[in-house]
Amino acid sequence: MQTILLVRYGEIMLKGLNRPIFEKKLVENIRKAVRELGEMNIVRAQGRIFIEPHEGFDEFPRLIEKVRKVFGVVSVSPAYKTGTDMETVYETAVLTAKEAVAKDGAKTFKVEARRQDKNYTLTSPEICQKVGGYVLRNVKELKVDVHNPDFELTVEIRDHAYIFSRVIPAFGGMPTGSSGKAVLLLSGGIDSPVAGWMMAKRGIELHAVHFYSYPYTSERAKDKVIKLTKILSEYTSPVTLHIVPFTDIQLRINERCSIGLITIIMRRAMMRIAERIALQNDALALITGESVGQVASQTMEALNATNAVVKLPVYRPLVGMDKVEVINIAEKIGTYETSILPYEDCCTVFVAKHPVIKPKLPIVEQQEAYAELDELIETAIQNTETITFQ
Ligand code: ATP
Ligand code: MG
């Protein structure tokens, strides 16, 4: 008997003729995600993926954690893989049930059976009945509850029998690399890592761009962004982080532009640089963590003024979300703790007390022209550092 990990995937099933390409990509991404846990046999069959670690493998929690983070995976189940004779199936079912009692304090169960092998001696209802009866007789702590059981003891008969009690949900989505690339404007805040995660979930490969204003922002603010990128790379890799020195641009804007418009002009400079980096890397869109009305620079007028400076589409997956909804996702994906570390961001260093809430584009453009940013933007791009997380 062997313990394996059974992997379910959903949406990519729908892709018709492209389906094999998506499935291949998914298997490839899983392989990459688990590579540091040693050699494993990973096979795709009948709309499932089976991960079979070597004998004596004892790192299932880590394996599950890694596979759960692969976009495209809908859920996973650690399962026993055994022979299909009923004696073995009974014993393994009892073992699985006892584990559910011991680990989770389960009191009720029901049996689910599926038969891939239609020539198998028993039908699915017969398997349910017989396995259920056997478990009841051998695990005294358990009763049957068909409506609301503590766990479903599932028996799947294929080339082998697969028996499990736990279905651990994952995130779904599309395998990374199955869509194009996009550039995420990544601050150290709560929103942009979530925005990047949401688009990566659609199969988009990320480049992240961070603007920092040393010495107005510290090394630690930069480390925080590196850490956030690393967390994102557990879900989607590779991610390349481009760190752009932004101090001179901010100082120039501050010095020459009308104070109420400095934030919007700074945001436009970020967008211009991000678009350049996108074009250098064959990316097809920009991604930001903006949401309508959250702050002065995110009114509809301000968003229009920011958008107008670039040609590439800007994806704003949080555009209609409340902060609490964003925070919930940040917690779920593991970026929240890092995002709330209290290091200053370049936006918070140079900020007007009374920003213009409804900026008019012609005025913004006129003010921006005073700053003569072209050369500074070139220099910033030339001095950009990159780090790739594989
Ligand atoms: P976040 O929580 O993502 O920082 P926010 O609510 O603080 O967002 P702003 O500071 O107005 O909003 O930033 C809006 C968006 O601009 C961010 O979501 C991010 O995409 C981008 N951005 C802001 N500051 C930076 C930065 N220093 N480097 C890269 N992108 C940035
Ligand atoms: Mg911010």
Image (cartoon, grey):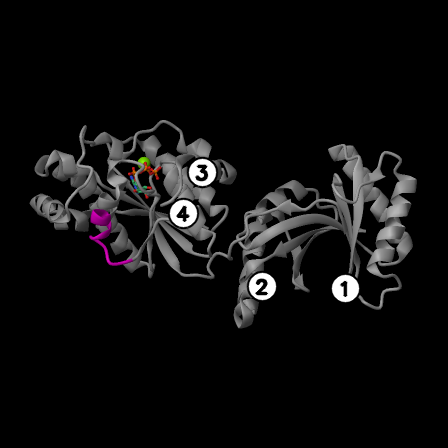
Q: Which residues are magenta?
A: 304-312
Which amino acid lies under the numbered mark 2 shown in the image of this protein?
A: Met
Picture layout, residue 364 above or below residue 45: above
Which amino acid lies under the numbered mark 1 shown in the image of this protein?
A: Gln
Identify the mark nearer the N-term, 3 or 2. Answer: 2
Identify the mark nearer the N-term, 1 or 4. Answer: 1
Mark 1 neighbour density, 10 Å: few (under 14) some (14–19) many (20 or more): some
Residue beneath the point at 85% across and 34% down: 141
Mark 2 neighbour density, 10 Å: few (under 14) some (14–19) many (20 or more): some
Considering the numbered disc 2 on the image, is that residue within a helix, a strand or a loop? Answer: helix
Q: In whole angstroms, how far apart are the C-alphas of marks 4 and 3?
A: 15 Å
Identify the mark nearer the N-term, 2 or 1. Answer: 2
Disc nearest the viewer among 4 and 3: 3
Number of callouts: 4
Is 21 displayed left or right of 222 in the figure? right
Disc nearest the viewer among 1 and 3: 3
Q: Which residue is mark 4?
A: 196
Disc nearest the viewer among 4 and 2: 2
Q: Disc 1 beta carbon < 8 A from ligand 1? A: no
Q: Which mark is residue 386?
A: none
Q: Which mark is residue 116?
A: 1
**Which percent across, then down, holds residue 207?**
37, 51
Q: Which mark is residue 13?
A: 2
Pointers 1 and 4 in contact (CB under 8 A)?
no
**Which percent across, then down, holds residue 351?**
20, 31
Identify the mark nearer the N-term, 1 or 3. Answer: 1
Considering the numbered disc 1 on the image, is that residue within a helix, a strand or a loop? Answer: loop
Pointers 2 and 1 in contact (CB under 8 A)?
no
Q: Which mark is residue 325?
A: 3
Disc nearest the viewer among 3 and 2: 3
Q: In whole angstroms, how far apart are the C-alphas of marks 2 and 1?
A: 18 Å
